Image (cartoon, rainbow, N blue to C red):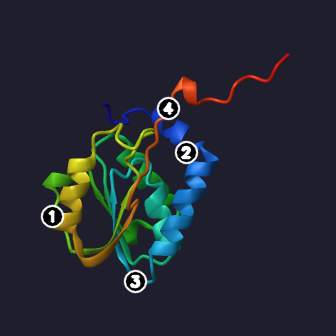
Amino acid sequence: MRALTTFDDFRELLADPVRMSAFRRAVFETVGEGDVVVDLGAGTGILGFWALQAGARRVHRIEKSEAIELARQVAAHNGWLDRVVLHAAVSTEVELEPADVLLSETLGAWAVDENTLPFTIDARRRLLRSGGRMVALCARMAKRTPQDAEPDPPA
């Protein structure tokens, strides 16, 4: 399992319209006016930007890679630096105010690629207020073997 560390990795995820549409819809359905939001493994910060557009009062972005600098630049360009707190750290080292919403898109293509389950569990326990909400709340995995595939039609 590996963490996303290059902008090529982020580009691949950002270019997936089904994935991005689902996350955007989930953020707008979950974040309310005045919410404090934690964007765990924020990467380029896209989920946090959507949270701001949805009305979040403040977004705490936690990201250990150099992508945190890109997120800072985009926040500055859009005039959001007063509502964004950047944490260039591993989430287990961060202390902050209790959040209303925890955003985490650190799933990779197979829902466990980035080995982040322990970090998500810790963030939910320490950083999310009682009764807080999460995106992504769950992931469903299914296995399909070549034997499960439809047979090729006769020629």
Q: CA distance from mark 4 to mark 2?
A: 10 Å
Secondary structure at numbered mark 2: helix
Residues under numbered marks 1 and 3 in contact, where contact means CB atoms less than 8 Å apart: no
Mark nearer the N terminus (3 vs 2): 2
What residue is rendered at 36% in x and 48% in y? Answer: 68
What residue is rendered at 48% in x and 63% in y? Answer: 49
Mark nearer the N terminus (4 vs 3): 4
Q: Amino acid at mark 2?
A: Leu
Q: Residues within 10 Å of mark 3 (few under 14, many from 20)?
A: few
Mark nearer the N terminus (4 vs 2): 4
Q: Quadrant of residue 57?
A: bottom left
Q: Nearer the viewer, residue 67 or 149?
A: 149
Residue farthest to the bottom, as pictured: 33
Secondary structure at numbered mark 3: loop
Q: Which mark is residue 34?
A: 3
- Please indicate, yes or no, whether residue 5 appears anywhere in the rendered image: yes
Q: Which mark is residue 95?
A: 1
What residue is rendered at 56% in x and 65% in y? Answer: 25
Q: Amino acid at mark 1?
A: Glu
Q: CA distance from mark 2 to mark 1?
A: 29 Å
Q: Which mark is residue 13?
A: none
Mark nearer the N terminus (2 vs 1): 2
131 relative to 103 in the view: left or right: left
Q: Which mark is residue 8?
A: 4
Q: CA distance from mark 4 to mark 3?
A: 34 Å
In the rendered view of the protein, which quadrant contains the N terminus? top left
Q: Residues within 10 Å of mark 4 (few under 14, many from 20)?
A: few
Mark nearer the N terminus (4 vs 1): 4
